[in-house]
Each structure stands twice: as structure tokens, then as C-alpha cells.
Amino acid sequence: MAAQTRYGASSCDIKICIYWKKKYSIVPYVTYGSLSADLQKLWDHPRSDANGQTCNELSGPLSPTECGAVSERYNLLALVSPGSATPNVVALFSSSGCDTSICTVWRQRYGVAPYVTYGNLPASYKASWDAVRPPGKKTCNDLAGLLDSSECGALVEIYGIVPGSSWGTAGANVQSLYTASLCDKQVCAYWRREYSVVPFLDWGTLPKSQQGAWEFVRQPSGKNCNELSGSLTASDCEALQLAYGIVAFGSWGTAPEDVKRMWDSSDCNKYACKKMVHPFPKCQVYLG
């Protein structure tokens, strides 16, 4: 009797739901996971001390992955259609923040690039993706996470953005996502990769309209794309060495300060040492 009293006083009838969910990989309203058949009945038993709710409602909020599972199981499309979901399922979905977290799930699952492409997102999902979420009046484009360098590059090209100069046709929401994703910096890596730019030396096939943006000094770093597009490769180091007359561990030749910084941060001495017929003593740290 004492154990029963303590069990009830500790709200174990409710807390056990959280324990079972974690231990048996249960997804509320979707799967019992590995929960045994006899415990499944207890999972679905309404708790009198919790307004008749079952473990489905009492086992905690849904994770983003679980939001995705519920959405697919019931064809529940946030802010558009409940599909076959009951009011209890819809309530759990909404209270778990699934209206927003589903954006990240869909982006990863279907290769959506915000404000660029729906990827493989099913056509029936697009209205939900574009639905405005209160209170910030944002859609999944704004809520699915920050952009990577390729997505930043795509925004620049689609909307005609010129970093440091013009927003092109980008609206306020696109501008906000671009800024939050540090696209002014990230686009440097995209341009270098996409257009075969060699920092400090060769524009590659970078459009002339963006060459000024490459040289644009970003704040707060005080650097332009030459230093922000990633480390130099062995061939880049060799090209700089020839262009500026740099001698590893010897002379900087005519290299300006920004070239010197990139040479050092990219460990170009290592590449230079490996090409020497008679390496300097200091090269031994690289050559063993």
C-alpha cells in the first residue's frame, strides 16, 4: 500500500510514459516501437489524474523527426490540412512546435533550398511550406535553417544580388535570410568553386559584374573574397609563389600583406618544401 501511495504521489502514471517512449523508441500516434503488447494497453489507458489523456499526449513533445513521422502517417500538412489526424493528434503536433520544425525535416529529406527550389518536395506539401507561420509572418523558407555556400550562391544569381552594392530583386525576407546566413562571406567559396577563381591571381570565369563584389571588403573581418574563399590548394600556393617570387622560409618577394597571410594560414611552405630539390633545414618539419 505504501508503494502504491508513493507511486501515485510521484505522478508515476504520467512519468512512466516518458520512460517508455525513450526506452522503446515509441513515436506517439505512429508506432509503439518495441513496447510489449501488454504494456501497449497501459500506454493507451486514459489517466484520470491527467484529464483523461493517454501516454500519447503525456510522453513529452515530439522531436522534429517525430513531427515528420506524424505528418506522413496522417498526411497532416501544417496550417493547410489535418489529413486523417484526429484533434488530439493535431493538438500534439501543434503544441510540439511541429508547424515550424517540419520545415527543417522537409528541407533535409527533400533537398529544398529556401527561396531557390522545392527540390523533391511533393506538390501537395508546397502550400504548407509556403504557409505563413504566426507570429513572425515567416514561411518554411525562413524557418528551415541557415543557408550553405551553394545556396547563398544560388540566391545571388537568382535575385541578382551584388554583395556590398545591390540587393537586386531580393525582398525583405530573402535579405534577412541572406544576412543571417553570412552569405556575403559564404558566396566567396561558391564563386571560387563554381568559377575556378584563383585567389589574388585569376578570375577564372567569374562574371565581370561580380568581380567588384569579390574585392569588396567584408566587415567585421576587413577581408575580401581572396582571403574568405577557403584555404589555398597546393597548385594555388605554387601559382602565388611564381607570381610574387616567394621563397619558402626565405623571401616574400613582392607579396603584399594579404597574400602573406593567406600563404601562412594555408601552410603553403609545406607544399613549397615538397617541391624543393634541396630542401631548406626548416623543411624537415614537413618532410620528416
Image: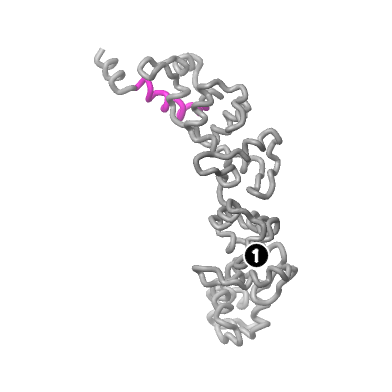
Q: Is residue 128 above or below residue 136?
A: above
Q: Majority secondary structure of the magenta segment?
A: helix
Q: Is residue 231 on the magenta stretch?
A: no
Q: Is residue 269 above or below residue 2?
A: below
Q: Position of residue 18 (x, y in %)?
A: 42, 27
Q: Position of residue 135 (x, y in %)?
A: 49, 41
> Is 18 on the left-hand or right-hand side of 119?
left
Q: Is residue 19 on the magenta stretch?
A: yes
**Quick one: which residue is furthest to the right in this view?**
205
Residues drawn in magenta: 12-27
Could you say whether the residue bearing mark 1 is in a helix, strand or loop? loop
Asked which quadrant contains residue 175, the reply is bottom right
Q: Residue at x 59, y 30 (%)?
A: 71
Q: Residues within 10 Å of mark 1 (few under 14, many from 20)?
A: some
Q: Position of residue 35 (x, y in %)?
A: 49, 21
Q: Residue at x 71, y 72 (%)?
A: 203
Q: Residue at x 62, y 25 (%)?
A: 83
Q: Which quarter of the figure is the N terminus placed in? A: top left
Please tell me which residue lies in front, 151 or 155.
155
Please tell me which residue lies in front, 5 or 278.
5
Asked which quadrant contains residue 107, the reply is top right
Q: Is residue 287 visible?
A: no
Q: According to the image, label 1 marks what residue?
A: 162
How many marks the image carries: the answer is 1
Q: Which quarter of the figure is the C terminus placed in? A: bottom right
Q: Is residue 258 visible?
A: yes
Q: Position of residue 264 (x, y in %)?
A: 54, 75
Q: Amino acid at mark 1?
A: Val
> Is 241 on the left-hand or right-hand side of 26?
right
Please tell me which residue lies in front, 46 or 253.
46
**Quick one: which residue is furthest to the top in this view?**
1
Q: Residue at x 56, y 78 (%)?
A: 258
